Image (cartoon, helix red, strand yellow):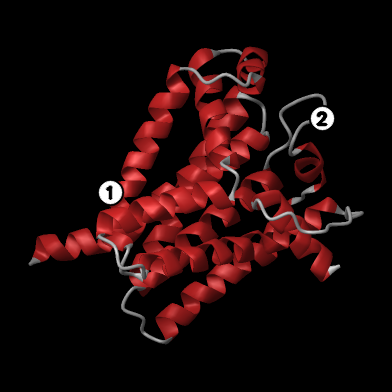
């Protein structure tokens, strides 16, 4: 079941066409979400070692992230932005999110988020811990949203089975994985332990803010919301990781 759970998580979150037999309990793949984020981080660290300028390497990481995930999360972000921006009633917002066309809200949000990521990565590109931790936090926060909120639509959808079968206790082990990482960083006096903690807290604040908005406007989460959660909490984690660095620079 462990292998099947990992295979299911990889098929759900990446473009890799792995052989996969459907699990009887789909929610078991949630345990592996942070690990899949760690695999993304390994690709990012490898990209950061290429002999190119900081700007090129930062852009490559963004492109690689979109490629490895099939652009699935970015698409969810766009649909989420259009749904919230174009509809004030639940059913209207959900209908807009289901539409395959992208509107002004989607394009503006996508541009702004990728611009922030590009700028942040230029400062994080030489810090392997940041490149590993940020995608882990993005996937962890998907688990939090899926485990704590109901599915917003009445019928079936991309993430309907996963969200409806997920319970609050399913986030305990994924969350414990990240807590252990943070504890180890402090125990071994890592130079970036504080940065990692701040990044985690800022990402956690972002996911609860998104959950509050989704609950109020949509009545829960959808696959698009989970995609938006990944992108926005990852972006928040990047900025959170930079906060201690910025304060250190101001104190000099």
- The residue at 47%/67% (across/down) is 132
The residue indicated by pointer 1 is 119
Q: Is residue 239 visible?
A: no
Q: Earlier in the sequence, mark 1 or mark 2?
A: 1
Compared with 16, 214 (above or below) is above
- Number of residues whose C-alpha sits closer than 10 Å to that of mark 2, classed few (under 14), some (14–19) or many (20 or more): few
In space, the residues marked 1 and 2 are separated at their CA atoms by 38 Å
Compared with 225, 91 (above or below) is above
Looking at the rendered image, the quarter that the C terminus falls into is bottom left
Q: Residue furthest right?
A: 24
Residue 70: % across, % down? 60, 44
Please tell me the numbered disc located at residue 185: none
Q: Residue furthest bottom?
A: 188
Residue 154: % across, % down? 80, 24
Please tell me the numbered disc located at residue 156: 2
Residue 48: % across, % down? 37, 66
Q: Is residue 232 visible?
A: yes
Q: In terms of secondary structure, where does tag 2 sit?
A: loop
- Number of residues whose C-alpha sits closer than 10 Å to that of mark 1, classed few (under 14), some (14–19) or many (20 or more): some
- The residue at 40%/54% (across/down) is 60
Q: To which quarter of the image does residue 30 belong?
A: bottom right
- The residue at 64%/18% (across/down) is 99
């Amino acid at each position: 079941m462990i292998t099947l759970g990992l295979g299911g998580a990889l098929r759900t979150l990446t473009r890799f066409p792995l052989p996969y037999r459907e699990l009887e309990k789909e929610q078991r793949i949630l345990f592996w979400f942070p690990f899949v984020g760690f695999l993304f981080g390994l690709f990012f660290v490898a990209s950061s070692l290429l002999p190119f300028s900081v700007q090129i390497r930062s852009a490559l990481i963004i492109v690689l992230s979109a490629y490895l995930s099939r652009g699935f999360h970015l698409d969810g972000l766009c649909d989420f932005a259009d749904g919230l921006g174009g509809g004030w009633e639940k059913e209207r917002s959900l209908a807009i999110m289901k539409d395959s066309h992208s509107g002004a809200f989607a394009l503006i949000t996508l541009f702004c988020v990728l611009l922030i990521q590009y700028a942040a990565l230029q400062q994080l590109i030489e810090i392997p811990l940041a490149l590993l931790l940020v995608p882990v936090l993005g996937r962890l926060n998907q688990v939090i949203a899926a485990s704590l909120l109901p599915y917003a639509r009445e019928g079936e959808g991309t993430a309907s089975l996963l969200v409806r079968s997920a319970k609050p206790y399913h986030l305990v082990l994924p969350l414990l994985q990240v807590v252990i990482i943070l504890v180890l960083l402090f125990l071994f006096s890592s130079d970036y332990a504080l940065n990692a903690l701040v990044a985690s807290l800022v990402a956690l604040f972002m996911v609860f803010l998104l959950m509050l908005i989704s609950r109020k406007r949509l009545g829960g989460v959808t696959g698009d919301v989970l995609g938006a959660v990944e992108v926005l909490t990852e972006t928040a984690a990047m900025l959170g990781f930079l906060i201690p660095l910025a304060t250190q620079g101001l104190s000099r």
